[in-house]
Amino acid sequence: MTFFGASRAAIALGLLFSTSAMAGTIVGTVSDASGTRALESAEVRIVELGRTVEASRDGRYRFPDVPAGTYTVEARYIGADTVRTTVTVAESGDSYADIAMGGRESNSIIVIGQAANQASTLSRQRAADGVESVLTRDAIGQFPDQNVAESLRRLPGINILNDQGEGRFVSIRGLDPELNASTVNGVRLPAPESDVRSVALDLISSDIIESIEVRKSLTPDMDADTIGGSIDIKTTSAFDRKKDLFKVSAEGSYNDLTDKLSPKGSFDFSTKLTDAVGVSGGLSYYRRRFATDNMEMDGWDIDDNGNAYADTVEYRDYDVTRKRLSASLSFDFKVGESTKLYARGLYSQFDDQEYRRRLTFEMDETPTSSTANTASFASDDGEISVQRDLKDRFESQKIRSLVLGGETETGPWKATYSASWAKSSERENGSIDPVNFERKFEDPGEFGVTFDYSRPKLTSYAVTAGQARFLDPSEYAFDKVERTTLSDARDEEFAIKADVSREYVMDGGVFTVQAGAKQRWRKKTYNAQFDIYKGFNGDLTLADFLGKQDYGLASIDPVLAKKSFRPFFRTNMADFELDPFDTDQASNESDFRVDEDISAGYLLGRWDSDKVRIIGGVRVEHTRNKIRGNQVELVEEGDEHDGVEVDED
């Protein structure tokens, strides 16, 4: 009984893992009739066997283990008529059937225009393993989007978090951007900012992108931390098209608050050096000068009359210059009929120079009087602090990625493999954030102000007492300056991965077993030095740095000139008094280093027929973190430290 049972099991395994000796392979490509472009995700079907596959990125399709005989191969693509061709399969070897879709006499405009873009998008979404939304190059080019985040706002279920009116972080189905995974050509992008895991996608220009895929459902072959969704950005490949491509664009935008024109230019290309070697790439540059007027309020409460009021009101005037430089370069190779190799790199830099001038009211007490739409404060009841400050900040963010990989197909087997490196960084040196001048009104009758909340988006103010002192710049004494001497955030990741799949042809469909493994090594560090100065050897007032306001929502005069304080500070730094306590606390509590190693493996099964696809499997990941930082302990005045009572904090 044992012998016969083992024999039957061995026979079954042999049948399962063997390839028929009387079977060949049908291979070919699907492209448009003009020979311009490969039709990715075209559905190709062997009519007699009911087997279906989707064309890959370069339009290639493949049917292994096809019994010898003559078959009808049918190709379908949204927006084009169905095309059929006949192919004869020998008892072994490859049989070729290249398919051109969209002849002159049919509705054949399938590679250009809005209809072509829609056809490409729908075809790729239909071919996806899960719920997926796709943006293609043509769709991105139809809109005046400046970066990848702004392009993604066109997709359903996507919400974009803006910064200064420009798209930055991406939320999928309302989930926190921290829960998303962002990749470029399959390479996980680390986050350039020190305190988040999410990647700000305003860093990458949309001009160099071939397509963006947003996967909204998890499958076992995806990283397990892709809880919100996966955003996969793909750059151009030379084999995406049958013909060479060279594109140049130039445009500009105008901001009426700054009266400045912002230029933008880009070019990209793809060409085949030989039938087996291709190169592609792109470069985009954008310089945007703009201004923003806004106001913010905090400390909302209800007074004794039952009316709402804010105890902090800020009027903010921004003047921003942003530069974005993105570049990509890819090499593609075909090694025989079975193997494709590639090398893809991306570099993107985002520089942000921001000047912010701010008028701030801070009230210690509740309003003297109020109505449903107004709140009046007076120094008779408590201190009112009026602050006028300037932020002069320059930061630079960079992303670099490089991946070497390929795929090999032989018989029913397919292997994909890659090794990648990515690094993101954000750096500031010497930003003034901010320099503050303050006037405190404490005496009765010295100052009064009324805020009008009747307009939901515009809270106005009126000074009811102390107008002369409020407008006199010499009344505002130097309070403090905070200098970001260094803010250096780095996030770097190395990864290797490999996937192997095997197809089993069965009655009514194909069953695929796929397994893979991935190893990631990630290191994130932050090094900061914040110097805080709270005194000056001499008299220093706002009158020494007086500028002209260009704020449109209210009068915030007197204001600091945007570029006046930095050279004075640099020249007279020895006269400013460093606060060692606040400096040490701010600098030491920020520094950290995290080493994160992730090992992953998965196994999945996929059933495909001409009507249904079913996927199931399991994924296992192990994460090891090593975290180092500073423990900062605050000992207040009068408390003991090491058995000794301290005289000050």
Image (cartoon, rainbow, N blue to C red):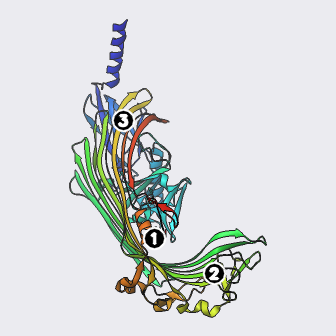
**Mark 3: amino acid:** Ala
Q: Which residue is mark 1?
A: 582
Task: Specify few, some or many for label 2: CA neighbours under 10 Å numbering under 14, 14-19, or 20 or more.
Answer: many
Residue 362: % across, % down: 61, 77
Residue 136: % across, % down: 43, 57
Q: Is residue 65 left or right of residue 613?
A: left
Distance from the alpha carbon under mark 1 to that under mark 3:
54 Å
Tell us which disc is closer to us: 2 or 3. Answer: 2
Residue 614: % across, % down: 48, 35
User: Is 484 located above or below residue 59 in the figure?
Assistant: below
Q: Which of 421/624 is in front?
A: 624
Count the numbered circles shown: 3
Q: Which mark is residue 384?
A: 2
At a point 45% along the width and 29% down the height, the residue shown is 508
- The earlier-in-sequence mark between 2 and 3 is 2
**Mark 1: amino acid:** Asp
Local secondary structure at mark 1: helix
Q: Which mark is residue 515?
A: 3
User: Is 227 located above or below residue 585 in the figure?
Assistant: above
Q: Is residue 27 left or right of residue 217?
A: left
Q: Give the quadrant of residue 632.
A: bottom left
- Residue 323, can we see it? no
